[in-house]
Image (cartoon, rainbow, N blue to C red):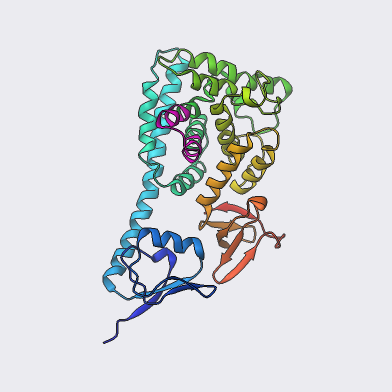
């Protein structure tokens, strides 16, 4: 008796399934019949064509495994949000200690970093968790945790050492510590700041540096990152107005993470932007303000996280991202069912959110 087969979506593929039909593209055989699918094979298939269906041998026991995998994925996402909530609380406690001039050690940040690090295996889920959880409410601590995580991700993509990654994430967690001394009404204002108010906000880099100096065993690289995270490569930043190579690498990295998180946040007085709009602006800033080497690596990494994700469109429909052109970041190629939508040529539709 011949084995039964079925065609399934890529999202339902799991390791151990056996191909009932070879996978071909443009007349070239990519995987042969009877090949056992591994995690690596599945990832490669997803990158080839995210809308295709794969024919595999039917096995009712595998169906139960598929549902189990889907359930575990949902549980993993929920777990990430719980982790972020706990990390925000821990960082808030540390900030409150520093605000009251209590003595703390840099080791207190190590516990937070290691807690996050355990959950940093899947960047796509981490990024989605950050963006989804922030919708519930915004605060300084969440922003600093997000910047710490995003900085760590960029450092990882850049091949930084374990120690560098440790200090880089600390820099992200601490970069805005100076804001605990800023008037809360000014800090959380949802309209354009006056010149005096903006001057007050700009003091947070130096104030943060002075606060952080009192943390026992803090490394100089972290202090430089805090002090310089608003410096820009063309000298238009603050507080030192230094240029290019004079800006510490940690500050350059945190600046990118800070810009991305701030632009996609609803806390600030500026217009809230989608991740894709934010990436486009950051790319444009790499011409003279942000370090282009780090920007390119950041954009490349974030783009990879969003391939295959679903987005909400301005017409109310839900689509899936299948390709992002780095020169048209906010106008990717999408699919809705079997239909393709190229936003580069479909100017009357925009992405409004990642779902």
Q: Viewed as shown, does residue 19 lie left or right of 164?
A: left
The percent position of residue 246, horizontal first and vertical second, equals 62, 22
The percent position of residue 155, horizontal first and vertical second, equals 49, 36
Q: Viewed as shown, does residue 246 lie left or right of 137?
A: right
Q: Which region of the structure is painted magenta?
A: 151-169
In this rendering, the count of numbered labels is 0
Q: Residue at x 38, y 37 (%)?
A: 117
Who is closer to the viewer here, 54 or 311?
54
Q: Can see residue 73? A: yes
Q: Is residue 248 above or below residue 103?
A: below
Who is closer to the viewer here, 303 or 197?
303
Q: Can see residue 70? A: no
Q: Quadrant of residue 126?
A: top left
Most common secondary structure along the magenta stretch: helix
Farthest residue in the bottom direction?
1
Q: Residue at x 53, y 28 (%)?
A: 250
Q: Quadrant of residue 23?
A: bottom left
Q: Is residue 178 magenta?
A: no
Q: Residue at x 56, y 16 (%)?
A: 207
The percent position of residue 270, horizontal first and vertical second, equals 66, 37
Q: Is residue 156 magenta?
A: yes
**Quadrant placement of the N terminus:** bottom left
Q: Is residue 290 above or below residue 4?
A: above
Farthest residue in the front direction?
28
Q: Quadrant of residue 295?
A: top right
The percent position of residue 63, horizontal first and vertical second, equals 31, 69
Q: Is residue 20 above or below residue 236?
A: below
């Amino acid at each position: 008796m011949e084995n039964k087969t079925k065609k399934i979506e890529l999202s339902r593929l799991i390791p151990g399934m056996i191909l009932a039909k070879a996978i071909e593209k443009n007349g070239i055989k990519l995987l042969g019949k009877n090949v056992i699918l591994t995690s690596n094979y599945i990832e490669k298939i997803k990158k080839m064509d995210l809308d295709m269906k794969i024919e595999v041998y039917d096995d009712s026991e595998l169906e139960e495994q598929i549902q189990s995998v889907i359930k575990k994925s949902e549980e993993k996402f929920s777990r990430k949000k719980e982790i972020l909530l706990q990390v925000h609380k821990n960082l808030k406690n540390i900030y409150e200690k520093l605000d009251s001039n209590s003595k703390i050690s840099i080791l207190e940040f190590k516990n937070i970093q290691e807690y996050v690090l355990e959950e940093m295996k899947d960047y796509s889920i981490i990024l989605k968790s950050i963006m989804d959880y922030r919708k519930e409410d915004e605060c300084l601590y969440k922003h600093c945790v997000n910047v710490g995580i995003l900085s760590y991700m960029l450092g990882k993509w850049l091949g930084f050492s374990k120690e560098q990654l440790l200090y880089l994430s600390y820099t992200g967690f601490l970069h805005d510590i100076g804001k605990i001394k800023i008037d809360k009404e000014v800090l959380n204002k949802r309209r354009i700041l006056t010149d005096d108010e903006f001057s007050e906000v700009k003091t947070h880099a130096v104030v943060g540096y002075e606060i952080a100096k009192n943390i026992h065993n803090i490394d100089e690289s972290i202090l430089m990152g805090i002090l310089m995270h608003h410096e820009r490569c063309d000298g238009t930043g603050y507080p030192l107005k230094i240029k290019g190579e004079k800006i510490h690498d940690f500050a350059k990295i945190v600046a990118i993470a800070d810009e991305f998180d701030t632009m996609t946040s609803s806390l600030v007085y500026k217009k809230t932007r989608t991740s894709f709009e934010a990436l486009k602006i950051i790319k444009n800033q790499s011409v003279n303000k942000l370090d282009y080497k780090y920007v390119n690596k950041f954009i490349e990494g974030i783009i990879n996280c969003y391939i295959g994700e679903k987005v909400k469109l301005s017409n109310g429909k839900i689509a899936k991202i299948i390709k992002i052109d780095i020169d048209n970041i906010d106008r990717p190629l999408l699919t809705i069912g079997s239909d393709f939508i190229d936003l580069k040529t479909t100017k009357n539709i925009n992405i409004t959110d990642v779902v």
